[in-house]
Image (tube, rainbow, N blue to C red):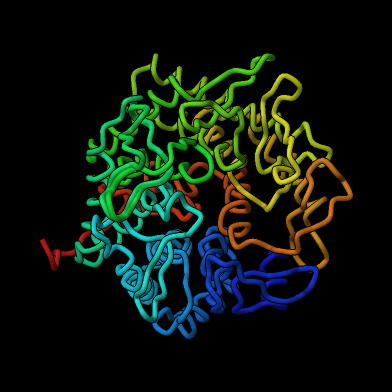
Amino acid sequence: REAWIHYKTYAWGENELRPISKKGHSAGIFGTTKLGATIVDGLDTLFIMGMKDEFKEGRDWVDQNLHFDSINSEVSVFETIIRFVGGLLTCYAFTKDEMFISRANAIASKMLPAFDTPTGIPHALINPASGHSKNYVWASQSSSILAEVGTLHLEFQYLSDITGDDTYKDKVMNVRRILKGLSKPHGGLYPNYISPKTGQFGQRLSKPHGGLYPNYISPKTGQFGQPHISMGALGDSFYEYLLKEWIQSGGKDMEARHMWDEAIDAIEKNLVHKSGSGLTYLAEMKYDRLEHKMDHLACFSGGLIALSGQSLDQKQKDHYLELGGELARTCHEAYIRTDTKIGPESFRFTRDVEAKAVRPNEKYYIQRPEVIEGWFYMWRVTHDNKYREWAWEAAQAIHKYCRTDTGYTGIKNVYDVNSPKDDVQQSFLLAETFKYLYLIFSSDDLISFEEWVFNTEAHPLPISGKNPAYHKKTTNKS
């Protein structure tokens, strides 16, 4: 409530809050326009927490002010879909308020020109007013990023089904078709970059580690770019959505489940390692060489892996519970080995250190949710009270070191109790971090795993065939 009140007081309608400066903030992913990102991202959290007055305030702002038609600056396609479209779809599922689905549809339609590449692999950035799109210049010869092109399926599938317009579903199914069709010498591993022109991994790589995918892909050629593979930045949510697409379908999308099974097998064979003291972690792979570094972003994976085993036989279920628990423990170690008891952006495993950031640019914390997210999933599938204890410790640390009199801020060095602050209250603090903290201490019936699946921004979407909020209209296009 504090975070919302201070945002409303000092930055209403802005994308995010600068709590120390007491003014609005807009990251590059939002372009230069005031889009109320914190409002849209945080609305479903307000609803879940029963903050009805605040929810109505946010709903009315969306109705009166949220329009993408005239935005004449570049916005992130990925962030727009997971935060804005995802958040609006969840609010529609919660309330059946047609305004939310109308606005989600309008925003999603402004993202469609990004898919107009030779392969249909979308570009990363789009100007909604002009429809012009492009990729980041830093991304491996202007490749598309695996985690971005592969993390649109839940939102577009649900949007197609409830509007009856298959356009959205067709776009993401084409992306899946291209990725699935590339050979994978190392199982289910995929490079982080892919060409949007040809739909191929770059440097004549196919899937060099089978079920693992490189992090870059060219929208022109469809080839994967530089062979960087990770469950952290650039790759993470692609793998997350493989499992969740199967869950969203009510267990009917077996292609997605097969791709997940192939991927987790390759992850275990290639990326899972143990430190000298026995901590299990996920390494990264660059040019077939391992980098023994794990991102905070990758810490969601313990819970996801444990969740993936729930439908399997007891032996496999126990195995994935054990692996998920080990990864969750490692991320906890990364937290408690800092002076603030908050984990760093990434941490390494070397001869000298374990679960500790080494470089200055790895020591910051920007209110990321993934560690707490992993513990939330582990709590739901095990009910082991240690996950609640760890979450409470983290909540207290965040309150102590990130809270100011006018909102919450990230800190630049988790190993320094007097760390400088970054003066940004992220929209995902409300969308994800606070939501997962609230839910881990709530009944399992609140956003039940039987009826809901979370998108990568923690916006719960209904499961087909199990949740009445998932209703299908007759399609406009076959």
Task: Using the image as rendered, state which of residue 128 and residue 454 is in the foreground.
Answer: 128
Q: Position of residue 424 (x, y in %)?
A: 70, 63
Pick out the residue farthest to the left. 478
Q: Is residue 153 visible?
A: no
Q: Position of residue 332 (x, y in %)?
A: 68, 32
Relative side of 64 to 427, left or right: left
Q: Residue at x 34, y 23 (%)?
A: 312
Q: Residue at x 46, y 81 (%)?
A: 72
Q: Residue at x 34, y 73 (%)?
A: 110
The quadrant where residue 428 appears: bottom right
Q: Position of residue 322 (x, y in %)?
A: 52, 20
Q: Is residue 203 visible?
A: yes
Q: Residue at x 27, y 46 (%)?
A: 176
How many numbered tags mark residues here? 0
Pick out the residue farthest to the right. 418
Q: Position of residue 358 (x, y in %)?
A: 74, 35
Task: Using the image as rendered, state which of residue 424 and residue 126 is in the foreground.
Answer: 126
Relative side of 78 to 340, left or right: left
Task: Using the image as rendered, state which of residue 370 and residue 131 is in the foreground.
Answer: 131
The quadrant where residue 257 appears: top left
Relative side of 337 to 72, left or right: right
- Which image quadrant: the N terminus? bottom right
